[in-house]
Image (cartoon, rainbow, N blue to C red):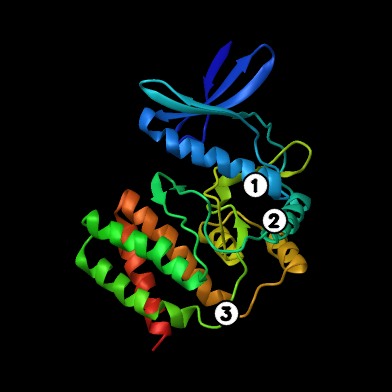
């Protein structure tokens, strides 16, 4: 039996665990984070059962008095070349073609360690206003991030129907936290996604986040568009969707993210004038 700390544990402890010739990836945190791991495990199973991309298998979720943990399949990394990027774009588009009858999910989960409410909602605009931006804006007030941020947030929520007017997306199966650090290629050249914040929403929300911090090639976007082209107006909507993640970073880390979120809100409100 062997334990070894590995990279990738900014929120959780991350370890390689070897036993009887088998290797496992183990995430651990405080015992009160059990629900977070249970929701993540359900999200991985949802993506694995219904999606077209590879995800790590879930072996166990558990806890004791001091710690909660999740034991996952260990997957060796390979080279993420252009062929992998093309495969990733195509498979993500096919995953987004898996749909539900409403926006949300059957349970709440987390985005990072922030609660993410997923109550089923028929209207996409209402879902994004109440379950995503509105929740984070209210959280910013509770966290004391300042009245300018909160006031700009209230202004934005008023004009949000105008920003999303005429856009009628289907509720697609989403990874929910798809930045460059949450995927890699396995040794067979298959893209692998992990650390999800799963729900059913506008597919553009996943794509928008891929642009937020970089890490995705031109071949990826071309391959996605070949399977399912983007709708007109995406350039504005992606700012609406990425604001959610910047607000979450502001609530988690403060600092420059607070001003960045406020400036994004001001630009979006100006789009409606």
Residue 119: horizontal and vertical position, in percent? Answer: 46, 57
Can residue 194 be seen here? The reply is no
| C-beta proximity under 8 Å, tags 1 and 2 | yes
State which quadrant residue 216 falls in: bottom right
Q: CA distance from mark 1 to mark 3?
A: 28 Å
Q: Which residue is mark 2?
A: 95
Answer few, some or many: residues within 10 Å of disc 3's Cα (few below 14, many 20 plus, some between 14 and 19): few
Residue 233: which numbered mark, if any?
3
Q: CA distance from mark 1 to mark 2?
A: 8 Å
Q: Residue at x 44, y 47 (%)?
A: 110
Q: Residue at x 51, y 70 (%)?
A: 124
Nearer to us of marks 1 and 3 is 1
Q: Which residue is mark 1?
A: 47
In the figure, 69 relative to 209: above or below? above
Quadrant in which the N terminus is drawn: top right
Residue 15: horizontal and vertical position, in percent? Answer: 52, 25
Is tag 3's residue or tag 2's residue first in the polypeptide sequence? 2
* Left or right of 106 on screen, residue 183: right
Residue 102: horizontal and vertical position, in percent? Answer: 56, 64
Nearer to us of marks 3 and 2 is 2
In the figure, 67 relative to 120: above or below? above
């Amino acid at each position: 039996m062997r334990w070894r700390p590995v990279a990738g544990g900014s929120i959780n402890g991350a370890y390689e665990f070897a036993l009887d010739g088998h290797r496992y990836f183990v995430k651990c945190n405080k015992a009160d984070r059990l629900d977070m791991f249970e929701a993540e495990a359900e999200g991985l199973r949802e993506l694995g059962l219904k999606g077209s991309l590879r995800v790590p298998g879930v072996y166990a979720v558990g806890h004791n008095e001091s710690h909660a943990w999740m034991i996952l399949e260990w997957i060796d990394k390979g080279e993420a070349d252009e062929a992998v990027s093309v495969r990733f774009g195509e498979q993500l588009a096919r995953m987004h073609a898996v749909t539900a009858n409403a926006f949300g999910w059957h349970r709440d989960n987390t985005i990072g360690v922030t609660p993410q409410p997923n109550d089923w909602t028929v209207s996409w605009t209402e879902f994004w206003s109440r379950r995503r931006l509105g929740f984070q804006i209210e959280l910013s007030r509770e966290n004391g991030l300042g009245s300018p941020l909160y006031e700009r947030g209230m202004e934005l929520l008023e004009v949000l129907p105008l920003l999303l007017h005429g856009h009628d997306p289907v509720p697609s199966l989403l990874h929910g936290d798809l930045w460059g650090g949450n995927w890699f290629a396995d040794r067979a050249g298959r893209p692998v996604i992990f650390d999800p914040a799963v729900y059913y929403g506008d597919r553009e929300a996943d794509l928008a986040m891929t642009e937020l911090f970089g890490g995705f090639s031109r071949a990826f976007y071309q391959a996605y568009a070949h399977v399912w082209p983007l709708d007109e107006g995406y350039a504005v909507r992606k700012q609406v969707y990425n604001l959610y993640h910047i607000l979450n970073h502001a609530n988690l880390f403060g600092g420059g993210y607070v001003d960045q979120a406020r400036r994004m809100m001001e630009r979006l409100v100006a789009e409606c004038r």
